[in-house]
Amino acid sequence: MSTEYDPARTYELDRRHVFHSWSAQAEISPMVVTRAEGSYLWDGDGNRLLDFSSQLVNTNIGHQHPAVVEAIATQARRLATVAPQHANDQRSEAARLIAERAPGDLDRVFFTNGGADADEHAARMARLVTGRPKILTRYRSYHGGTQQAINFTGDPRRFANDDGKSGTVHFFGPYLYRSAFYATTEEEECARALAHLEQVIELEGPATLAGILLEAVPGTAGIMIPPPGYLAGVRELCDRYGIMLIADEVMTGFGRTGAWFHTAAEGVVPDLLTFAKGVNSGYVPMGGVVLGPRVYEHFAHRPYPGGLTYSGHPLAAAAAVASINAMESEGIVANALRIGEQVLGPGLAALRRRHPSVGEVRGKGVFWAIELVADRETREPVAPTGGSSPVMAAATAEAKRLGMLPFVNSNRIHAVPPCTVSDAEAKEGLEILDRVLDRVDALVAE
Ligand code: PLP
């Protein structure tokens, strides 16, 4: 079997027949990717690029991990598909491995195809269990592209999809650099964000609120690590008002922050937890909802009104089992934490000191945002929320020219390599970012 193919033909057919996500179709020029390995991928011109995006922040185990690839191939030969109502060894084992790592008493897994449907099902469960209609979510969040999930989302992509029927109410979360609460310390930001959330709950009517859906750390929206005590404070509000806490760990889960789950690391136990991406690094699509006794008991003797043909698909489940086992045996989660503490954290802080266009760097593990500003005093972003700008386009192009694929959103570059990234690769990424930021400094000064 040949793995070679014709990049020009790939591109031509893509442009003729493929309809891409989130894009003005005639204005895009997709990069052809021919192969990938570990922290690198190769484009159609044969250029090797350091993957500092982990694609859409999902290849936590790196590209083409041999144990995961082999597990998929083995499972394909044994049982390539099976209906969700049957039991299957890979699904059972994946559920055990996930439940063992989930916080507190969350011990049952409903498998979905990805993150958006995981969030939708979690919200549906919260509504059915509480008998209440509305879901609270953050401004500056991302929860997926389906009709409900995009309306849970707190970024401008929901505007065009907002039919006014989603039953979602947005609130402000903690984000000290652009505080909605005029706070100047993390403690103030935390206390005021919680007071704001409590007011929203009171004024919306607690008896109308089924769940608070919250990214454990907002990812696409800017990697704002919640201040100490915030997640616990939200848990406390949920308990006080009978609201279910739904933690979206689609991007944070499985090593990204240097922990299996950020909520577990913080000692916070949600009622429902959603995952996708890093569960098997997206080698085969998979997401899911982890739930505890309260939700389970509700559906113990009445049917759950929801399901999917591919729930717990054996190829995806085999990939999850192999991936979690490899992450455990190779110390990949610990590597992510260490890289954050020893390489990316200090390296990015040094870049901030050196480059006036960097307003703030923040993150943990292999989950970092570099926020670019036209002016450090006013903190004016170099691109609007949800949009781009010539400066951001130039930064992206420069990174690629220098051999790196970055994750870019609004006025931010996210440094989000695989959890397997080596010290040398992380340093290579920092060196490229240094040169990219030289260019941004120059453009901003013009
Ligand atoms: N939730 C979060 C936090 C995400 O980052 C994403 C995707 O980026 C989703 C949900 C949606 O996942 P999917 O694209 O698999 O539907």
Image (cartoon, rainbow, N blue to C red):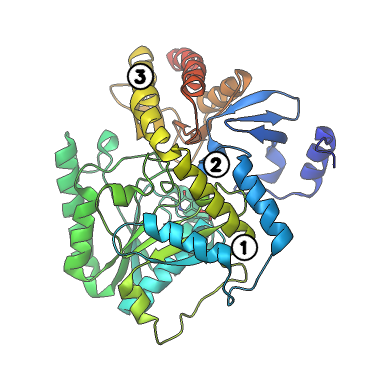
Comparing labels 3 and 2, the label whose residue is closer to the camera: 2
Looking at the image, do the residues carrying marks 3 and 2 touch, with CB atoms under 8 Å apart?
A: no
**Is tag 1's residue or tag 3's residue first in the polypeptide sequence?**
1
Looking at the image, residue 79 sits to the left or right of residue 85; the answer is: right
Q: Judge by depth and name the residue closer to the eye, 371 or 85.
A: 85
Looking at the image, do the residues carrying marks 1 and 3 touch, with CB atoms under 8 Å apart?
A: no
**On the image, numbered disc 3 is attached to which residue?**
352
The amino acid type, in three-letter code, at marker 3 is Arg
Provide residue 181's location: percent of width, then percent of height: 20, 43
| Callout 1: SS | helix
Provide residue 410's location: percent of width, then percent of height: 46, 36
Residue at mark 2 to residue at mark 1: CA–CA distance: 19 Å
Q: Judge by depth and name the residue closer to the eye, 245 or 174.
A: 245
| Callout 3: SS | helix
Identified at 70% across, 52% down, the residue is 73
Provide residue 237's location: percent of width, then percent of height: 19, 61
Residue at mark 3 to residue at mark 2: CA–CA distance: 27 Å
Residue at mark 1 to residue at mark 3: CA–CA distance: 45 Å
Identified at 35% across, 45% down, the residue is 217
Q: Judge by depth and name the residue closer to the eye, 351 or 30.
A: 351
Residue 446 visible: no
**On the image, numbered disc 1 is attached to which residue?**
314
Q: Which mark is residue 59?
A: 2
Identified at 61% across, 24% down, the residue is 400
Looking at the image, residue 87 sits to the left or right of residue 10; the answer is: left
Q: With respect to residue 267, does 178 lie above or below?
A: above
Residue 282 visible: yes
Quarter of the picture containing the N terminus is: top right
Q: Which mark is residue 334?
A: none
